[in-house]
Image (cartoon, rainbow, N blue to C red):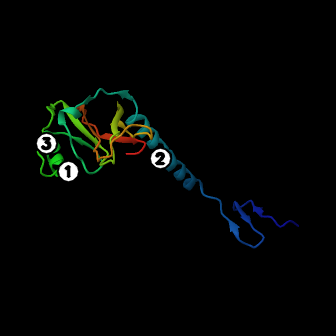
Amino acid sequence: MGTGPTEDAASGRSARPDGSARVSPTPPKVAALAAVAGLVCAGLVYAYAFERGDDRPLAWRDVTRQLGPAELPRPAGRMFNSAQELRRFLIAAMPGREPDLPGIDFERREAVLLATGPRSSTGYAVEVENVREERGRVVVHVRERTPSLGDPVAARVTYPYRLITLPRRDKPVEIIWEGRP
């Protein structure tokens, strides 16, 4: 006589040697779990294919020089839809200084400010790697360039930043910092 479970054909239960019974899941529960798993997978595929599909480059303009020197004390990656919004942000970030804003046509364009905060020497820079438009968003890939040991740099506090404009798309803008921000 074996010690493994025995099958009770009439009930669909397995009798265990200790007298307990193992009940197999009922078909409606299995079907419900399969349906939920299928919906989750379909939602993920839809979100990835729809939101991130049709990936293409988006032309952007660098207007950093038009803004001039800016001492932004904190890292920033932010989009602005109006001159007033950009002005308020810069005044709050640099008290006592009235910024001279570049001529941006906010009816057709939006501005994106990318800043690292203070750095200990010259040789640091913010570089826009690329800007891509997807179905549901615009993605700005940014990298901070840091000096190498042999690079000639001056020991003084700097505030690397970049101000770019994009064609207005009425989509959320996501900023991805490659490397160290």
Mark 3 vs 1: CB contact within 8 A: no
Foreground: disc 3 or disc 2: 3
* Residue 26 x %, y %: 60, 57
Looking at the image, residue 137 lies above or below residue 116: above
Identified by mark 2, the residue type is: Val
Task: Give percent across and percent down for residue 43.
Answer: 44, 43
- Asked if one can make out residue 136 in the rendered structure from this viewpoint, the answer is no
Which residue occupies the foreground of this view, 118 or 83? 118
Q: Is residue 7 left or right of residue 68?
A: right
Tell which circle, 3 or 1, labels the residue nearer the N-terminal end: 1
Residue 175 locus on image (x, y percent) = 34, 41
Q: Tell me if label 1 and label 2 are in contact, CB under 8 Å.
A: no
* Front disc: 1 or 2: 1
Residue corresponding to mark 1: 93
- 124 with respect to 13 (left or right): left
In three-dimensional space, the C-alpha distance between marks 3 and 1, rounded to whole angstroms, equals 11 Å
Q: Which residue is mark 2?
A: 40
Classify the position of the N terminus by image quarter: bottom right
Q: In the displayed orientation, state which residue is furthest to the bottom.
A: 18
Judged from the image, the secondary structure of the residue bearing numbered disc 2 is helix
For disc 3, the marked residue is 99
Residue 95 position (above or below residue 103): below
Residue lying at the far right of the rendered structure:
1
Q: Of helix, strand and loop, which one carries label 1?
A: helix
Say left or right for 37 vs 117.
Answer: right
Q: Residues within 10 Å of mark 2 (few under 14, many from 20)?
A: few
Q: Amino acid at mark 3?
A: Pro
Going from N to C along the chain, the mark reached first, 1 or 2, is 2
